[in-house]
Amino acid sequence: MYDNIILQAFVGGDRAKTRADLELAKSRLRNFDVIFILEHLSHTLQLATTRLGWRPAAQGAFHATRHLVDEAEDQERLFTTHGITHEQWQQVIERNSLDIELYDYVRELSFGMLQADGFPMPTEDERTVAPQWNNDVLRMRRASLREAHIE
């Protein structure tokens, strides 16, 4: 089964994943000392100094990976404009909604670490997820979770 593979990595098993699995993964993630987010590596890599004891790099060294993110965005544009229909993409999103929700949670945990350690956070524009992730199903789920303050 190839749906929700990130969630599967955290909880194991080859059956369909449930909300209980999502909550178990979140519980496990709350015990992580550090979480790096590839799309925000120039920000989250700074956590290595406070949480892993790495020596601080020269000013600007954490921004050296920005070109990799730009390349990834170029690849994403190619993927999203060729070979997959909007309807197919929506099916992928719906079938992997638990993974997407877990990713959102992981990002917030990492950003919370940045804030707790006194590092600058990505701006709201930098935090914006690629448009194809912003379908109606996910928007409604995220809004209901924010209202319920579910962690």
Image (cartoon, rainbow, N blue to C red):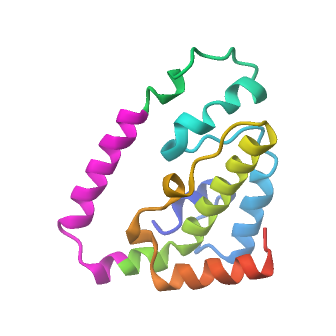
The reply, left or right, for residue 14 in relation to residue 30 is left
**What residue lies at 69% left-to-right and 68% top-to-bottom?**
22
Q: What percent of the width, then of the height, locates residue 12?
A: 65, 58
Q: Quadrant of the C terminus?
A: bottom right
Vertical arrangement, residue 27 with respect to residue 48, above or below: below
In the rendered structure, which segment of residues is drawn in magenta? 66-89
Residue drawn at (38%, 80%), measured in percent from left and top?
90
Q: Quadrant of residue 46?
A: top right
Count the marks. 0
Q: Residue at x 68, y 27 (%)?
A: 48
> Of 90 and 115, which appears nearest the observer?
115
Residue extending furthest left? 82
| Residue at the image point whose x is 21% and y is 57% from the top | 78
User: Does 50 appear above or below 72?
Assistant: above
- Relative vertical location of residue 44 with respect to residue 63 in this rendering, above or below: below
Choose top left, top right, bottom left or bottom right for residue 20. Answer: bottom right
- Give the camera-side residue of 25 and 36: 36
Q: Is residue 100 left or right of residue 55?
A: left
Q: Is residue 122 left or right of residue 64?
A: right
Q: Is residue 110 above or below residue 1?
A: above
In which image quadrant can residue 83 be found? bottom left
Image side of residue 1 versus residue 24, left or right: left
